[in-house]
Amino acid sequence: MLVVTARLTVDPDRIDEFEELARQLWSETLRREPGCRRYEYVRLPERGHYLTLMTFDDHDAFLTHQASAHHTAIAAGPMRELVTGIVLDLGETVDGASGTVDSPGAEPLAVDPALRVHYAVRYPAPDFGAWA
């Protein structure tokens, strides 16, 4: 499968507009594109910075996405005016080590409390309240 990541920088004064367009594009993509397996927008801690994660059956499905009427109408239209920078990378999944799963029946984990504290200090939770 083809994985595409896009790091987007958005005009910080137009975040709400961008996120509304992202919702529209997400909805249309998942509704209309059977070759798209994952499509997510992720807010990064720095205001106006996003990561988009996309997984397609293959390169052809990605090209179909890019050339679709809904992508052209949203991403190449009003969304483009809000994006001030973009870095796009194409990769492929690692067989047996990628994808999303539901794990409602997962077994309880053995966790070292001291190591958990170590990682909490090393990777503090982002303060998305600072975006407001």
Image (cartoon, helix red, strand yellow):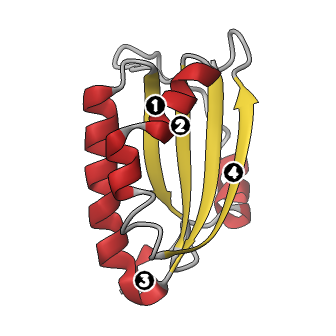
Q: Which residue is mark 1?
A: 38
Looking at the picture, which amino acid does disc 2 mark? Met
Mark pair 1, 3: CA separation: 26 Å
Q: Nearer the viewer, mark 4 or mark 2?
A: 4
Q: Which numbered disc, 1 or 3, marks the residue closer to the eye?
A: 1
Is 53 rendered above or below residue 23?
Answer: above
Label 1 sits on a secondary structure element that is: strand
Q: Position of residue 77 (x, y in %)?
A: 39, 63
Give the distance between the C-alpha atoms of the residues marked 3 and 4, in whole angstroms. Answer: 24 Å
For label 4, the residue is 88
Q: Are marks 2 and 1 in contact (CB under 8 Å)?
A: yes
Disc with the residue nearer the chain's start (1 vs 3): 1
Dot 4: element: strand
Q: Amino acid at mark 3?
A: Trp
Q: Quadrant of residue 103?
A: top left
Residue at mark 2:
54
Q: Position of residue 112 (x, y in %)?
A: 67, 39
CB atoms of marks 2 and 3 within 8 Å: no
Q: Which residue is mark 3?
A: 131
The mark nearer the N terminus, 2 or 1, is 1
Is 129 placed above or below 124 here?
Answer: below
Amino acid type of disc 4? Leu
- Identify which residue is drawn at 47% across, 38% down: 67
Q: Position of residue 35 (x, y in %)?
A: 45, 19
